[in-house]
Amino acid sequence: MSGDTSKIVADTLKAGAEKTEHSGSDWILHHVMDGNYLDFSPFGKVYLPQIELFGFDLSITRHVFVMWIAAALLVIVFYFASKKYQKTLIPKGFSNLLEVFILFVKNEIAIPTIGKGYERFLPYLLTAFFFILFGNFLGLIPFSATFTSNIAVTAVMATFSFFMIQIGGIRKNGLFGYFKGLIPHGVPVFLLPIMVVVELLGLLTKPFALAIRLFANMTAGHIVIYALISLIFVMQSYLISPVSVGMALFIYGLEILVALLQAYIFTMLSSLFIGMAVHQDH
């Protein structure tokens, strides 16, 4: 009887190892990609409402849910911060921290890259910076989700930056002047058709780069963490757990830095592109 039991246990472990080996990538993607539920494993799942209107799927997903939380936190945090500024001009505590980030975006991003007239674009740059920052940090909380690792979200944010770039350039240089300024001076006439296509493609590659950069960097870090944790199950040994968990914690620490860095890079590149569109002659 004990021999049969040992054989059953051995077969079960072998089957589990084969299943883990074949479905390891599926397990990682399951935690990284979007879904119609909040995952509180191993405690269970909470399914979100499924909504369809006029043939369009408007269902609430976990990325949408966390995005709403980030937006609500932005409103609440800055509402109370503004209230404190009404009482005193000297910020304290968390308001002081917010002022550090606001001055950083203003003095280190907007003014150097846009220059004169930066005030018009500063509200958008601050909104983009803090929205990405809150989203990145919310994604590091257990049982949460990183909506900035969703290509649809980053594409929409990049589209907003694209429109800000075009609006800024057209408002400063005029419609004809802006698009005329995209073509380098002194280009031969026979090259103009080619240059027009190249410059139009250049306009589209800027938001594409913004979307892919944010999406790829935020997704990559989470995949590495889950891959390191999955080594414990793939190798079917607890001996690997100290190394696996230790390396995962190290990458998690790097993710905190990446969360700050990616918010800065997206905002800085958006501001740089706006500055290039506004000041074409410089």
Image (cartoon, helix red, strand yellow):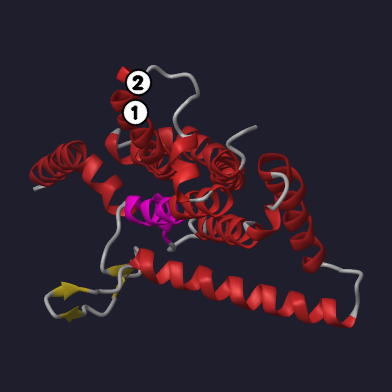
Disc 1 or disc 2, which is closer to the eye? 2
Seen at 30% across and 33% down, the residue is: 235
Judge by depth and name the residue closer to the eye, 274 or 141: 274
**Which quadrant, please, contains the C terminus?**
top right
Which residue corresponds to mark 2?
189
Judge by depth and name the residue closer to the eye, 182 or 123: 182
Judge by depth and name the residue closer to the eye, 189 or 173: 189
Label whose residue precedes the other's in the sequence (1 or 2): 2
The location of residue 77, given as percent across then percent down, is 66, 73
The amino acid beneath tag 1 is: Val
User: What range is drawn magenta here?
Assistant: 145-160
The image quadrant that residue 180 belongs to is top left
The location of residue 239, given as percent across then percent down, is 42, 33
Name the side, left or right, on which 156 lies relative to 275: left
Q: Main secondary structure of the magenta part?
A: helix
Seen at 28% across and 36% down, the residue is: 234
Which residue corresponds to mark 1?
198
Q: Is residue 235 visible?
A: yes
Magenta region includes residue 157: yes
The location of residue 157, given as percent across then percent down, is 44, 55
Magenta region includes residue 70: no
Q: Is residue 272 above or below residue 263?
A: above
The location of residue 57, given as percent across then percent down, is 19, 72
Q: Is residue 15 above or below residue 175?
A: above
